Image (spheres, rainbow, N blue to C red):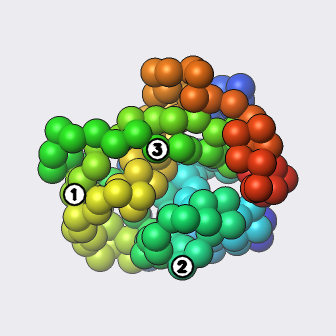
Amino acid sequence: MIRDILKMGDPRLLRIAKAVEHFNTPELDELVEDMFDTMKHANGAGLAAPQIGVDLQVVIFGFEHNERYPDAPEVPKTVLINPVITPLTQDMEEGWEGCLSVPGLRGVVNRYSMLRYEGVDQTGNPIDRVAEGFHARVVQHECDHLIGKLYPMRITDFSKFGFTEILFPGLDPNSDD
């Protein structure tokens, strides 16, 4: 089922999400399925449960090709629950980000260039991966939603923040909804 995506300004996006305690349940399976349906419908690269009003530490991400980020490399389809992120370098990379909860806008955000992410999938199986580049950016962006942060809160140079249709005239601004 496609769920409504909360927009910036909704106080539910600022909450700290709770850890998932029960795995391999019909409720969790339904949540994950709804999240993938919603992400696909919105052409997203990822989605966090708080973005659809569910206050749990669940993020999904992954795509082979994404219309919103046409130059981005493939990111593995992942369900990540109760994540822990560990930077593997202090090197930061600037990159453009958008968000389904901040439609029509893009901004440059500094993110760790390489990290390890750990957690579990919806059945409780452990996940332990190293990511770099755009993959690492997606993980950090989605996990920020679990601590009540939206990417504009991480922007340091607001001259690199604006409307998608102005900054990227070749992209369909409606794909940023």
Badge 2 crowding class, 10 Å Cα cut-off, few under 14, some 14 to 19, many 20 or more, is few
Tell me the residue at 53%/44% (across/down). 96
SS category of the residue bearing label 3: strand
Do we see residue 174 in this rendering? yes
Nearest-to-viewer mark from 3 and 2: 3
Picture coordinates of residue 166 (x, y %)? 77, 38
- Locate residue 13: give its quadrant: top right
Picture coordinates of residue 5 (x, y %)? 73, 49
Label whose residue precedes the other's in the sequence (1 or 3): 3
Q: Amino acid at mark 1?
A: Arg
Name the residue nearer the viewer: 164 or 148: 164
Tell me the residue at 70%/39% (across/down). 167
Tell me the residue at 58%/35% (across/down). 107
In the rendered image, which residue does mark 3 sit on?
95
SS category of the residue bearing label 1: strand
Note whether 49 is above or below 13 in the view shown: below
- Locate residue 83: give its quadrant: bottom left
Query: Number of numbered discs present?
Result: 3
Nearest-to-viewer mark from 1 and 3: 3
Distance between the Cα atoms at labels 1 and 3?
19 Å
In the rendered image, which residue does mark 2 sit on?
64
Note whether 171 is above or below 103 in the view shown: below
Q: Amino acid at mark 2?
A: Glu
Tell me the residue at 24%/67% (across/down). 129
Label whose residue precedes the other's in the sequence (1 or 2): 2
- Locate residue 132: give its quadrant: bottom left
